[in-house]
Amino acid sequence: MKNILVTLLAVVGLSFATVAQTKLGHVNSQEILVKMPEYKQAQTKAETFAKELEGSLQSMTTEYQKKLAGLQSKEGNMTNTERETAISELQQLEQRIQSFQVSAQERMQKQESELLTPIIEKVRGAIKKVGETNGFTYIFDLSTGATVYQNGTDVTPLVKKELGLQ
C-alpha cells in the first residue's frame, strides 16, 4: 500500500513538472503574412493575371453579343439552314465561354497557390525558429480558428522581428 502511494505521488509530481515545463504561445500568421512585401507583390501579380483573364472573357462575351445581335437583325431574311448554322455557332461560342470561365477559375487558384506557398512556408519557418529559439512547446495559430490557450504568449512580434517586419 505504501509503495502504491509513493508511486502515485511520483506520477502526480512528474505530471506537474511536465505541465510546468510546457511553454505555450500563439501567433496570428495572417497578420504577419499581409505585412510581408512578398505577399503584396503576389497580390499584385494575381490581380494582373485576373485582369488578363477578365479581358479575354469580356472579348468573348462581346463577340457573342455581336453575333446574337446580328442573328436577331437578319433572322427574318435567313433561310432555315442559315438560322440553324448561326444558332449552332452561338451555342458553340456560349460553351467556349463557359469552359473558359471554369478554366480561368482553376488557373486563378493555381496561380494563387504558386504565389503564396513559398511565402507561407517562409512564415512557418520563422514561427518554427522562434519556437525553437524561445523554448516554446506549442505555438497556436489564431488565424486558423484553432483552440488557443488564452494565457499563452503572443509570439507574433517575435516572428515579425525574425522576418524583419515592424
Image (cartoon, rainbow, N blue to C red):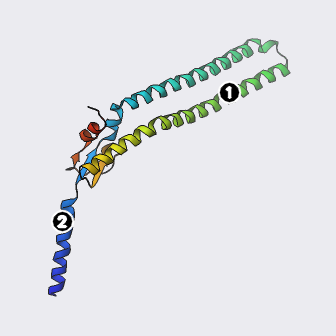
| Residue at the (50%, 37%) spot, across then down | 114
Which amino acid, mark 1? Glu
Ranked by sequence position, the earlier of labels 2 and 1 is: 2
Which amino acid, mark 2? Ala
Check residue 27 in the rendering and tell me which mark sits there, or answer none: none
Left or right, 86 with respect to 28, comes to: right
The 10 Å Cα crowd at callout 1, few under 14, some 14 to 19, many 20 or more, is some
CA gap, disc 2 to disc 1?
Answer: 69 Å
Quarter of the view holding residue 43: top left
| Residue at the (47%, 34%) spot, across then down | 115
Pointer 2 residue: 17
Pointer 1 residue: 94
Residue 44: x and y in percent read 45, 25
In the picture, the quarter occupied by the N terminus is bottom left
Nearer the observer, 134 or 97: 134
**Secondary structure found at label 1:** helix
